[in-house]
Amino acid sequence: VQVQPHPTFKRDGNNIRSDVKVPVATALLGGKVEVSTLKGNVILTIPSGTSSDQVLRIRGQGIPAKDGTGDHLARVVITVPKSLSDDAQAALREHLPAA
């Protein structure tokens, strides 16, 4: 049996891998994002201070097998807005160290 590639999901044994877009504010402060899985959408909690490329595990959302169901491994891709208001820029400059 050969499994056809999927545009969103990648199989890794009994686990499923995908990318999840996370707004920069959610990555910094923490929050929740909706993630599409094989079994439908679920809410994933993003811890504060999450970095891009960090992988978060959603247990039991992978491929069912005799020895148990795999997990969904969501790789965080931080999204940055294309533009910021003057107030938002000033707030960032005030609170974040310069690069």
Image (cartoon, rainbow, N blue to C red):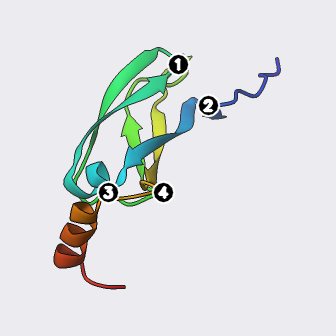
Residue 60: percent from left, percent from top: 40, 24
Mark 4 — residue? 53
Q: Give the Cα separation between the discs numbered 2 and 3.
A: 22 Å
Mark 2 — residue? 9
Q: Residue at x 45, y 15 (%)?
A: 40
Q: Give the Cα separation between the discs numbered 2 and 4.
A: 16 Å
Q: Amino acid at mark 3?
A: Thr
The residue closer to the viewer here, 60 or 41, is 41
Q: Residue at x 79, y 23 (%)?
A: 4
Q: Residue at x 28, y 48 (%)?
A: 26
| Marks 2 and 1 close (CB-CB < 8 Å) | yes
- Label 1: state its secondary structure: loop
Mark 1 — residue? 38
Residue 63: percent from left, percent from top: 55, 21
Q: Give the Cα separation between the discs numbered 4 and 1.
A: 21 Å
Mark 3 — residue? 50
The residue closer to the viewer here, 68 or 36, is 36
- Label 2: state its secondary structure: loop
